[in-house]
Image (cartoon, rainbow, N blue to C red):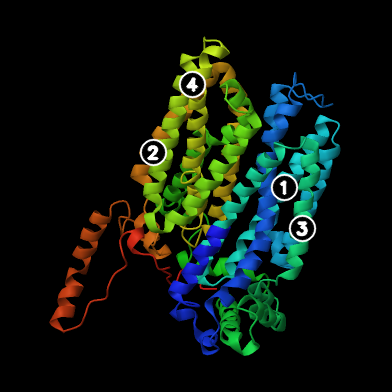
Amino acid sequence: MSVIMKSICGLVKSRGAAPADEKGALDKHKIKALRVALPQVLATSAKNLILLGYGMTLGFPTITIPAISAGSDSGDVLQLTKDQISWFSSINLICVPVGCLASGPLTQPIGRKRSMQFINLPFIAAWLVFHFASSLTELYLALVLVGLAGGLMEAPVLTYVAEITQPHLRGMLSATSSMCVILGVFVQFLLGNFLPWRTVAAVNACFPAIAAISLFFVPESPYWLVSKGRVREAERSLCWLRGWVQPSAVAEELQQLRDSLQQKHKQLHMGGDKEAAAAAAAAAAATPRGEAWWRPYTRRTFLQPYLLVAVSFFVGHFSGMTTLQTYSVSIFTTLGAPIDKYVATLYLGLAELAGTLVCVILVHWAGKRPLTFVSTLGCGACFTAVATYAYIHSGADADAARPHAWLPLTLLLASAFLSHSGIRLLPWILIGEVYPAAVRGVASGASGSIGYIFSFAANKSYFFMLEGLTLWGTFYLYGAVAAAGAVFLYFQLPETEGRTLHEIQQHYSRERDLLSPRRDERRRRRLQQPALAHAHAHGDAPARGPEKYAATNPALVLDDVESRL
């Protein structure tokens, strides 16, 4: 987090307290940039404690499976078969989409802050059930609880950070969400090196309790408060979030919030749920009058982005990293890792964390396409090399493999770093960028659901693949999926970094070409030639277009489609 804080400090120093369109009253009161950013960082950090706890639920099966597998020498009362283990590693993932269905209806009536506090209760209950579990049913019950809680947190967690942060900080602070999930996985690997799994579960119960308490010290979303008519509370919330300032310093922003919501009500001529009204307004603006509600879902502007996101999820989960993270202790043991299997798992968590940090820092400047190709091809090459190693030594005894035992360990750690620097995070980034306004809400939910379904399928099918293909055959398949995925993404993944939502939609409606900056530039020049000729004839300076590469477009670009709140 210190690296993230340094990046944020550099960002606010280089751009001031806020961009030109955010200055307003804050600039008049000469509020220091760091003072403006600090409360937003603190509020986001309180929210991130929930994501840290969710990451722990993803890493917990990894340290538990070796102790409860049939034939283990742990002496635990629970001894699961391979089929039961495959369910233990995946039930929580298939329950997440179910929780997502109730996430929105829960969040709007009681608020973002209270929703996030409430979500910690099933997490605490699940960890206690894990600690005292004496039957398979109790284990499955705890997994269902953490899965449902993981789905319930989606709406309040995503909307809270979007509604409390200023645009020039939003990207960096939003990116810390993935960091905290991976950090939670790493914390589980770390605790698993020193404590039995039941003790780890008891320790884990403390984290959601700390998260719930921390949220008492941060304000509710001012956007939600205004939508409920609680303007005074919204004013106090904004004063806290903008650097503990006086009400006069946030009067302009508060008025913008009120005007925005009032305008949406006037456009719809209806009361009721504010978020539903906003979604309906966006859909109405993007859908021709009289058109059936399902028509936008049949167009290429929905189908092509959905295919891109779905394939990205598939490649991310079936190129090996999902099963490696879940079954890492077993895999390292099978390959004869030269160090303790739990220590090797700890290194795996460090590699994932480092890769995520690299992605967060570099994606804005390098762009998504370069990171994705390096990540996917590198991950595929690592799994292919490990498969070759496993094939060569499949008939040898353990002693014959020891001189080279460091090789598969190094390659698998490299695959963890590479995958989390690109392909594992890519679909989650794309979800918020590639869909038109008319379908964005439904499409985002459907995309997240398909991602969890693929994650469930990858974990559940691992033992079946192991029995049918052996370890080296399974890893060869992972390498082939990564290679095929890289080819698909080369022809289908546009460079969306540094582009407005409007430009991305132009790409999918074939008005622009974000796959090839050169082709796009030539097309733009052809379209602009008449306008340029007219401008030169009248002595006008033509408007400068947006930069073409993410590396040369470091400033946040917004258009009328995107929210400035």
Q: Earlier in the sequence, mark 1 or mark 2?
A: 1
Q: Earlier in the sequence, mark 3 or mark 1?
A: 1
What residue is pinned by disc 3? Answer: 210
Tag 2: residue type?
Ala
What residue is pinned by disc 4? Answer: 404
Q: Earlier in the sequence, mark 3 or mark 2?
A: 3
Tag 3: residue type?
Ile
Q: Nearer the viewer, mark 4 or mark 1?
A: 4
Q: Nearer the viewer, mark 1 or mark 2?
A: 2
Question: Please, what secondary structure does the residue beneath circle 4 have?
Answer: helix
Residue 196 or residue 378, whichever sits in front: 196
Q: Are marks 4 and 2 in contact (CB under 8 Å)?
A: no
What residue is pinned by disc 1? Answer: 148
- The vertical placement of 340 against 393, above or below, is below
The Cα atoms of the two marked residues, 4 and 3, are separated by: 45 Å
The local crowd at label 3, few if under 14, some if 14 to 19, many if 20 or more residues have their Cα within 10 Å, is some
